[in-house]
Amino acid sequence: MEEILKTLTIVLTGGPYISEYAEIAFKLAEEALKQYQVNIFLYLDAVHIPKKGQKPSFFTNAGELFIGLAEKGAVIRACARCAAARGYIAEEGLENESNCRDYIPGIKISSLYELSEMLSKSDRVISLSR
């Protein structure tokens, strides 16, 4: 009999360098992936986390952390309205496992409907917000 994993959803709202929430979410998700299906939803300024080409001088590159989570099976989505308002546009047919050419691989822009679905199927939800 196949074991059904429980699901953890993490909702982030802050930008990658305004707090340590992106790093905290990474650590929580990395550990949870050992026992849970993990969803991460990027909302408001958190849609900046997966931007390619970030070179923070004194901080960990939050986007690069999230590449590893996606490779390990975490589902990472960014709010379409929040992303569009900040200049990130979803496109079809891109080849980097993303639907936004400004995003690192494995992270897609999606709707709040997907957040609703994530939440309804989650056993646990963590919101990291200011």
Image (cartoon, rainbow, N blue to C red):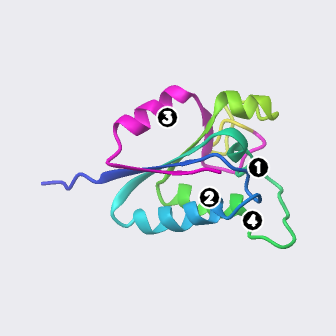
Which region shows up in magenta?
A: 101-130
The residue that disc 3 covers is 115
Question: Which of the two discs, 3 and 4, labels the residue nearer the N terminus?
Answer: 4
The residue that disc 4 covers is 61
Gap in angstroms between the C-alphas marked 2 and 3: 18 Å
Asked whether disc 1 touches disc 4, contact meaning CB atoms under 8 Å apart, the reply is no
Gap in angstroms between the C-alphas marked 1 and 3: 20 Å
Asked whether disc 2 touches disc 3, contact meaning CB atoms under 8 Å apart, the reply is no
Q: Is residue 123 left or right of residue 70?
A: left
Q: Is residue 80 visible?
A: yes
Q: Which mark is residue 103?
A: none
Question: The residue under label 3 is which amino acid type?
Answer: Leu
Query: For the view shown, which residue lies furthest in the bottom direction?
Result: 58
The residue that disc 1 covers is 51
Question: Which of the two discs, 1 and 3, labels the residue nearer the N terminus?
Answer: 1
Mark 1 Cα-neighbour bin, 10 Å: few <14, some 14–19, many ≥20: some
Q: Is residue 91 visible?
A: no
Residue 120: say if magenta.
Answer: yes
The residue that disc 2 covers is 66
Gap in angstroms between the C-alphas marked 1 and 4: 10 Å
Residue 109 screen position, x and y as percent? 63, 35
Look at the numbered disc 1 and give the secondary structure of its residue: loop
Please, is residue 77 above or below residue 27 in the view? above
Gap in angstroms between the C-alphas marked 1 and 2: 11 Å
Please, is residue 41 above or below residue 5 in the view? above
Question: Which of the two discs, 1 and 4, labels the residue nearer the N terminus?
Answer: 1
Residue 86: quadrant of the picture:
top right
Residue 18 screen position, x and y as percent? 76, 57
